[in-house]
Image (tube, helix red, strand yellow):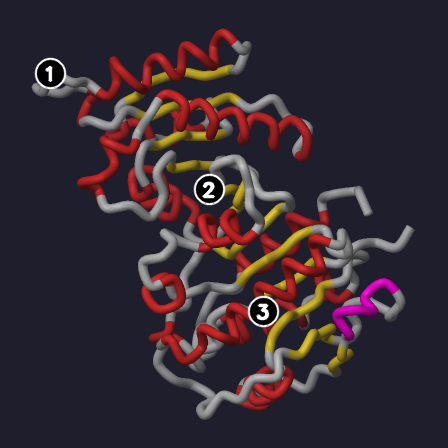
Amino acid sequence: MKIKPILLVTGEPYSVIFELFFKIYKLKVVKNSKRPLILITSKNFLIEQMKHFKYNFKINLIDEKKINTQKLNNKKINIIDINFKFKKKFDKISNKSNLFILNSFNIALRIIKKKKAIGMINGPISKKHFFNKKYLGVTEFLSNKTNSKKKPVMLIYNSFLAVSPVTTHMPIKNVSKNLSIKMISDSILQIHKFYKNKLKKNPIFAVLGLNPHCETVNKFSEEEKIIKPAINKMIKKKIKIIGPLSADTFFSKKNIKKFDVVIGMYHDQVIAPMKTLYNFDAINLTLGLPFIRVSPDHGPNNGMIGKNISDPKSLLSSINFFNKFNEN
């Protein structure tokens, strides 16, 4: 059976994504990969970027409807062309790219729905311009586009440690009122299932409290009323889990060695220390979709576009992640 390709939706064109891709594409680990990679982007824009960074890679133009019959490997850059004209090679991020990004996602989702790809990597997206307050981020956008019944779960993963915020791109003032026993439990169950089925591992979870030192002077304690009941529910399901633990002291080296996954109550509670510990050696996974979606763990970084100084480690990790899977 033919090996299914990985789809790479380049996302925001005025970002560092092309520079990062060129840096990893010249590596043997990508060129010799058995699993093909298909870029969904603008051919003309890709060529312009290639000229700027002084690369001369060959291009293999792919017809979306003929993926199964066309020859695919990574000796050439496989590309599905989004015929879109950009006025400038480098520009500030704005909503002018929105239609291009939407069309790119739509093509990727059509291909995945027909089971012609193993999953999707997406380049960085500007939440401010593309989602325009309609969605909190790519996680929620793809969940809506695929009519997913489960609440999607964000997992920032590397082989040493993974972290997951129960609430994602949400204002801090809204976090407490959006937490629930079900929300925490569902996130843990999805992550546990992913580790068992895909990574063949029985993970050990740490769950952080919401309040400083897991204490509050208020009558309502999120730790007592929400977090502890969710943990007890997971213990009854034989899941290896400890908490709630105080976030201020948790991320020491001796602590994190004991766990596979850290569940936090809000975005920066777990993602800020994760990036401090591992820089960009991590990937962003969305669980709960009908497919696996991966994103490099960084934003568009418009200020560094065209300077050729960005670190491609997270994009390379995203591709290598899919190469771990044996299924076609």
Q: Residues within 10 Å of mark 1 (few under 14, many from 20)?
A: few
The residue that label 3 is drawn on is: 104
The residue that label 2 is drawn on is: 154
Q: Residues within 10 Å of mark 3 (few under 14, many from 20)?
A: many
Indicate the amino acid at tag 2: Met
Q: Position of residue 41 (x, y in %)?
A: 60, 75
The residue that label 1 is drawn on is: 219
Does dot 3 land on a helix, a strand or a loop? helix
The reply to whether the magenta stretch includes residue 286 is no
**Span colored in magenta:** 63-68
Indicate the amino acid at tag 3: Ser
Furthest toward the top, the residue is 236
- Residue located at (42% from left, 30% from top): 262
Left or right side of 4 for 109: left
- Residue located at (64% from left, 66% from top): 107
Furthest toward the left, the residue is 217
- Residue located at (35% from left, 80% from top): 92
Left or right side of 64 for 238: left
Q: Nearer the viewer, residue 10 or 16?
A: 10
Can residue 282 be seen at all in this image of the molecule? no
Q: Nearer the viewer, residue 170 or 269?
A: 170
- Per the model, the C-alpha gap separating discs 3 and 1 is 49 Å
